Amino acid sequence: MDLTPRQIVVELDKYIVGQNEAKRSVAVAIRNRWRRQRVDDSIKQEISPKNIMMIGPTGVGKTEIARRLATLTGAPFIKVEATKYTEVGYYGRDVESMVRELVENSLAIVRSTEREKVHSEAVKRANERLLDLLLSPAPGTNKNDTDSDDDTNTTSDAKLIKTLKHERNREKIRKMLEDGLMEDRTVSIVSETKTIPMVMGNLPGMESMEIDFQEMFEKIAPKSRTKHELTVKEAREFLIDQESEQLINKEKVQASAVELAENLGIIFIDEIDKIVASEKQHGADVSRQGVQRDLLPIVEGTTVQTKYGYVKTDHILFIAAGAFHRAKPSDLMPELQGRFPIRVELNDLKKEDFVRILTEPNSALTKQYQALMRTENVELIFEPDSIEALAEYAYAINQKMQNIGARRLYTIMELLLEELSFEAPEKQGSKLTIDAPYVKQRIEKVSKDEDLSKFIL
């Protein structure tokens, strides 16, 4: 990934409005990873990523920045909730499981890349197997040679004729396959699978034992044969998948996945403010403090056992996020705070931000609904004054009720377009215009009725 920090910010601007400080911070962090790959090996291992903590209310773009960043860079990425982990001994998941999930994500990326490399060869092999399924084997291939010496010449001539005829037929069928004339023909394919039972059920602190049991069952589990009746079109995809798996080197893929996760992996830890313990240390608060202690070695750098080998977390980029309404970043353990040296504060969304969110991003809600209506052959038009009205309602409701940021637009847009969405199949070929009076008609009553808006908006 050779994008400069400025180019990364430009790409993020296509999906996220504002929050320039956060975008710049993550862009620099990603570029530093690119730089690290190009320094001398003597100092390469000493350069660790500068983890980032995003602070801001819900719905302002914290998660979206991290997710779009991972998509942009092609890096392994997982989003985890800090609240689902717990100190070993309490009910919940072990914090090391986030690293295992990251490796699984990395494995999927590497496997996809390797499958693309062998795709052309896999297609060739799949087509040959299709020909074998559509045409019986060449004469003499599965037949014991019991001919006498006297008949050798005669038999050889007959076999040669049959072989030539078989080859001609095979080429005819190959041509028909290439021309797509046999896509609806049915063939039978037998596949082999191993039935591997689930082990241990994710008991806290037992993940390493679970891995050992899983590997043991994979080796001893019996194979079950299943016969599939598929069309040629379906069978081709099935066979391509089989051949691709056989062509790729599993050990190489696993080693590359571990390396990719170690050097380019991104773990986004959301709701980190929810594991801040209160002053009274009892009950769940003890577990929250324990989660911080367990997170510390993962973020600092440790080695985690996975199904595919040991993974070092020293160079994984951690991005933490939290609203910090009832707590402050300084309430976290000092050691954990020190592992997130870059702090960025995301701003509350204003009315102008809502206007931009509704119009500028490639995946803006207005564009999404227009695309949905086009499937019904209905053209949906949003007038500029309707965008202004929607933004004003979203901002006002956030101020009056719980501030949920841009997520408020989802509920408002659903309420606004509910009737149109219901009646769209009956209005095919029509053009529907949304203006400010229509927005007011649909939203005004609910927004002013506080009892009603609590449940709807």
Image (cartoon, rainbow, N blue to C red):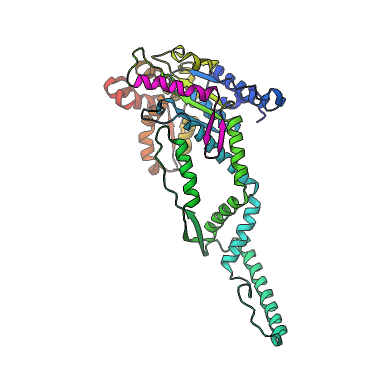
The residue closer to the viewer here, 373 or 198, is: 198
Tell me which corner region of the image, top left, top right, bottom left or bottom right, holds residue 362.
top right
Question: Residue 43: x and y, percent?
Answer: 69, 22
Question: Residue 447: x and y, percent?
Answer: 33, 21
The residue closer to the viewer here, 361 or 28, is: 28
Q: Is residue 124 left or right of residue 189?
A: right
Q: Is residue 361 visible?
A: no
Q: Give above or below for 231 relative to 277.
A: below
The residue closer to the viewer here, 454 or 433, is: 454
Residue lying furthest left: 451
Q: Is residue 423 visible?
A: yes
Question: Residue 133: x and y, percent?
Answer: 56, 65
Q: Quadrant of the C terminus?
A: top left
Q: Quadrant of the N terminus?
A: top right
Question: Residue 323: x and y, percent?
Answer: 43, 18
Tell me which corner region of the image, top left, top right, bottom left or bottom right, holds residue 232.
bottom right
Magenta stretch containing residue 285, yes or no?
yes
Magenta stretch containing residue 341, yes or no?
no
Q: Give above or below for 79 relative to 160.
A: above
Q: Is residue 440 left or right of residue 387?
A: left
The residue closer to the viewer here, 404 or 395, is: 404
Q: Give above or below for 155 relative to 261.
A: below
Look at 53% across and 24% down and name the residue there.
Answer: 318
Query: Which stretch is magenta?
Result: 284-312
